[in-house]
Amino acid sequence: MDSINKYGTFGYRFQDSSEVPLYQLFAVGCDKVTDYSYSWDGIKRIDGPLYLFQYTVSGCGAIELGGDVFNIPAGTALMADIPGEHRYYLPGTSSHWEFYFILFRQKYLAETWQRIIGELGPLPHFDAGSPVIRILEQLYSEARLGRINDVYQASALVYRFVMELCRSQTAHRKDRGSWPDIVSKAAVHIERNYSRSDLGLDEIASSAGSSKYHLARSFAAATGSTPLAYLTRCRIEHAVDLLRRSGMTVDDVARSAGFANGSYFSKVFRRWTGFTPGEFRKAEEMPSIDRFMFD
């Protein structure tokens, strides 16, 4: 933000006459406010329904939510529904508020947006070099250069931005440092004992000092997976390695990975990878795969 010439707001009102679902970009901009009259009341706004993502580059903003006031410092984003019960503004304690923002219509995005906010909260933190913020900056750059010319291009840009938000939501779940203690303990126990065919949910929960019902809920909330699905994933990953790097029979691979028998292992392996263990090992009609990434 070296020059005031870098600031601006670009609005879009493309006609959506297509039969395919399109995401509608409303506006994208970059601004630096120093006037303490800067204030947006979510209930009084008449430009909605919209979704807002506003990312602080420097300075600090503030928002009133649910009767409380929260600061929006550098590295923090504001995610809000418009109309909505909130008011964001430049507080008297800050000399300025510098930010990027994007507004887009709610059509086709309500469920996804609410899921993202439910996971990240309305004031998530993003590093300046994170993919979400890089894409927001690129989107603004495209707008400044006059390269957003039709509804399809605008929809693709909004889709890319929202998908990166979804990916950050998934990454948040995969950040083990944010997992509750019982989830971390359960995951470690699974990783150390997955090769045992008798390992079950009761033992996993006991290792974490939890009931199996509480663990199942906590594990799913933190990781997006159930404890037993996590156990199966560990077993399949081990099996992939053995099938590629050893001459063990399928039955021996199954037992080493914690499956009771080769027949059941083959069914589970196919469900997770799309191939039988034998097809995967031969790899005659597909590129050699040394490792699968499972979501």
Image (cartoon, rainbow, N blue to C red):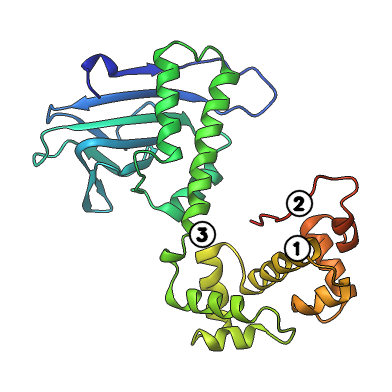
Q: CA distance from mark 3 to mark 2?
A: 23 Å
Q: Residues within 10 Å of mark 2 (few under 14, many from 20)?
A: few
State the SS at label 3. helix
Q: Nearer the viewer, residue 88 or 268?
A: 268
Q: Secondary structure at mark 1?
A: helix
Which residue type carries mark 3? Lys
**Residue at the disc numbered 3:** 174
Q: Nearer the viewer, residue 142 or 152?
A: 142
Q: Is residue 17 left or right of residue 63?
A: right
Quadrant assignment for the N terminus? top left
Q: Residues within 10 Å of mark 3 (few under 14, many from 20)?
A: some
Q: Is residue 48 visible?
A: no
Counting residues from the start of the chain, the first of labels 1 and 3 encountered is: 3
Question: Mark 1 touching mark 2, by CB under 8 A?
Answer: yes
Between disc 3 and disc 2, whose residue precedes?
3
Which numbered circle lies on residue 240? 1
| Residue where numbered disc 2 is placed | 289
Judged by depth in the image, the label closer to the viewer, 1 or 3, is 1
